[in-house]
Image (cartoon, rainbow, N blue to C red):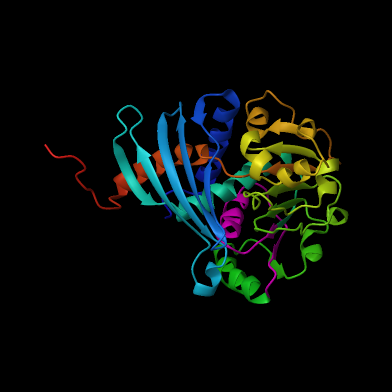
Amino acid sequence: MGLLTPVEYVDRVEHAFRMHGLGRVYMEPKGHIVLDRYRGEWEVMPSYIEEPEAAACKWVSIREDNGMYELPAVFSILIYTHPETGFPLAICDGSYHTLMRTGASAAVSARWLARKDSKVLAILGTGSVGQGTLATCDPVFPWDEVRIWSRSRESVDRFLESERPKFPHLAISGTTEVEEAVTGADVIVTGTHAREWIVDDGWVKAGAHIAALGADLKGEQELDPRTLQRARVFVDDIRQCREDGEISVALSVGLITEDDVAGEIGKVICGELEGRQSDDQVTVFDSTGIALQDSATVPLEYERAVAAGVGVEKKMIST
């Protein structure tokens, strides 16, 4: 925790998307085990990236009702291996890593797709992803205003109490009304597990950019489908997003087709696809979270941990 700066997380995630756009990666869509007994799932996310060469696998547990136990909704374990031999270089908690690299995906999308004069940021969801979003979006634009939303006033107040001291230069406010948070915002980041859309298209101003981070399981939906119909839509990985992302519900009922999706953000970053086309255009980034975000980030985390003497070294083979 704290081994990388927020800017470094943003740069590493941007690199992951760039390598994805260039096709210099090996990665399959994340595997799921969905539990009906508990509201949640397990995910497995292996990946390999060519430059700098790295291989990693993340095991994620998601339990949406963990708040009643005063536990985070997401836990993860990250395994970093030597690409050639498969030798495990590090086994570590991936929870802080995940909230930062997930938030960084929103920051990268804003860097490449939002209007350059963006001043107002709205973050919907006060969980760990909201914390990572605030930390990583902070250096991307000189925000005049940051608005935080949650359904419960208690959650809003807890977030403000925790995060305001970390960002004294930001004017951060909180609300339990989505319309209040979203109306007039230049960049909107959604990080909930909503099953019915929470952001009405009528609240989204012309020229806004939306990073939809929350929907990563079939049936989840945060945005009014009319926004997807009028926006220029990008995804992190079309194979994942068509099944589990924000676009999946609209695709399944025929409100949009894959032809309505502009493409993957990696293609924008590597210069093969046009991003925003006008100041009035609404842009949407559908992020399900790809394993490459882990393999692009963990080498630097590992390097910093070794240099700082963090962790416990264990002998993995006998001689």
Residue 46, relative to residue 72: is it above or below? above
Relative placement, left or right, of 197 versus 241 is right
Percent of width and height locating residue 229: 84, 42
Q: Position of residue 305 (x, y in %)?
A: 34, 47
Which image quadrant: the C terminus? top left
Q: Is residue 73 above or below residue 259?
A: below
Residue 251: quadrant of the picture: top right
Query: Is residue 115 at all visible to an observer of this figure?
Result: no
Identify the residue at image location x=33%, y=27%.
Answer: 84
* Residue 25 falls left or right of residue 279: left
Tell how many labels. 0
Task: Name which residue lies at 73% across and 70% down.
Answer: 176
The residue positioned farthest toward the bottom in the image shown: 154
Farthest residue toward the front? 37
Compared to residue 318, the image places residue 59 above or below, namely: below
Q: Where is residue 90 in the image (x, y as percent from the top left)?
A: 32, 44
Q: Position of residue 48 (x, y in %)?
A: 45, 31
Query: Is 124 contained in the magenta span?
Result: yes
Inspect this view and state whether residue 288 appears.
yes
In this orientation, which residue lies closer to the viewer: 246 or 100? 246
With 235 as the anchor, is 282 left or right in this view?
A: right
| Residue extent of the magenta highlight | 123-152
- Which quarter of the picture shows residue 58? top left
Instruction: Give the farthest residue toward the left.
Output: 319
- In front: 268, or 245? 245
Q: In which quarter of the image is the N terminus?
A: bottom left
Give 154 or 26, whichever is nearer the viewer: 26
The quadrant in which residue 113 appears is top right
Q: Which residue is drawn at 41% across and 28% down?
A: 53
